[in-house]
């Protein structure tokens, strides 16, 4: 990459590197966000050239883009098992523990990743961190009683040793952001999450929480765009 490369160049390079993992006949999960969009754009000419795939999208936004580019999108209920999902990340921590959901698609992203044998994460270099939490953790919550659920989320973050637990309803109270599933998103500015597994378990025990952006034990490979090229991080024996 040249000296005046941009974050977007890093995202594109990581996305293009992920093409190597795509094989003919695969059932493929398509992620959401600007890096995943680069991947869909890079994939489209291959499909046009005859690459056969079954694709499932993690958001309405990605489904629309894929279809516009000539990639047919199938229903997860019909496909059921996927070989690979390629998706972006907001933060990538030790052990390829990931925060996702900056684009609001965390629930579908997690359902699709969970249905996949392998998840490859693609990201720019700034996403790599020593400790998760600087990026506010997206938590998808039911509309009913959202205020109360947000309080429970803040308490869980405090109990799990996060250095902060500032909650914000995405979009604000007057115009809350709604996910593809019609839920709200509470972003939890934790600053640092010392024990992501414990926080994940605590969040999953709160009834109003529909999903959270901690992806633990799901990604096995991360392709990170950096000024010098793409670095591959791979978990052993995954
Ligand atoms: C969407 C996500 C995205 O993968 C994440 O926000 C990264 O986005 P980008 O590739 O635009 O930096 O989780 O819900």
Image (cartoon, rainbow, N blue to C red):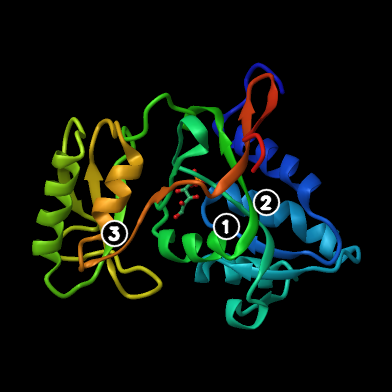
Decide if residue 237 is on the left or right side of residue 61: right
Label 3 or label 1, whichever comes before in sequence order:
1
Residue drawn at x 64%, y 43% is 238
Pointer 1: what residue?
31
Q: Is mark 3 within 8 Å of ligand 1?
A: no
Label 3 or label 2, whichever comes before in sequence order:
2
**1 and 2 marks in contact (CB < 8 Å):** yes
Q: CA distance from mark 3 to mark 2?
A: 31 Å
Q: Which mark, residue 39?
A: 2
Q: Which tag is nearer the camera, tag 3 or tag 1? A: 3
Pointer 3: what residue?
204
Q: Which tag is nearer the camera, tag 3 or tag 2? A: 3
Q: Which tag is nearer the camera, tag 1 or tag 2? A: 1
Q: Secondary structure at mark 3?
A: helix
Q: How would you rate the neighbour count of disc 1 (Cα within 10 Å): few for under 14, some for 14-19, many for 20 or more?
A: many
Residue drawn at x 31%, y 32% is 134
Label 1 or label 2, whichever comes before in sequence order:
1
Q: How would you rate the neighbour count of disc 2 (Cα within 10 Å): few for under 14, some for 14-19, many for 20 or more?
A: many
Q: Position of residue 174 (x, y in %)?
A: 14, 65
Q: Is mark 1 within 8 Å of ligand 1?
A: yes
Q: Position of residue 106 (x, y in %)?
A: 42, 58
Residue closest to the eye, 7 or 134: 134
Q: CA distance from mark 1 to mark 2?
A: 9 Å
């Amino acid at each position: 990459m040249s000296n005046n490369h941009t974050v977007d160049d890093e995202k594109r390079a990581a996305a293009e590197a992920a093409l190597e993992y795509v094989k003919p006949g695969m059932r493929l999960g398509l992620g959401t966000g600007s890096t995943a969009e680069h991947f869909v754009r890079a994939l489209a000419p291959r499909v046009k050239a005859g690459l056969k795939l079954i694709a499932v999208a993690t958001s309405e936004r990605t489904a629309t883009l894929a279809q516009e580019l000539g990639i047919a999108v199938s229903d997860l209920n019909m496909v059921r098992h996927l070989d690979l999902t390629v998706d972006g990340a907001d933060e990538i921590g030790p052990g390829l523990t990931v925060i996702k959901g900056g684009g609001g698609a965390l629930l579908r992203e997690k359902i699709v990743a969970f249905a996949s044998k392998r998840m490859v994460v693609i990201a720019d270099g700034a996403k790599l961190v020593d400790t998760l939490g600087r990026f506010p953790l997206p938590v998808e919550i039911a509309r009913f009683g959202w205020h109360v659920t947000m309080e429970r989320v803040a308490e869980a973050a405090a109990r799990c040793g996060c250095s902060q637990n500032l909650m914000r309803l995405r979009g604000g109270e007057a115009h809350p952001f709604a996910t593809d599933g019609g839920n709200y998103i509470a972003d939890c500015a934790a600053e640092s999450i010392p024990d992501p597994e414990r926080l994940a378990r605590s969040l999953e025990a709160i009834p109003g929480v529909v999903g959270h952006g901690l992806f633990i034990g799901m990604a096995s490979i991360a392709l990170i765009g950096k000024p010098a090229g793409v670095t591959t991080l791979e978990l052993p024996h995954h």
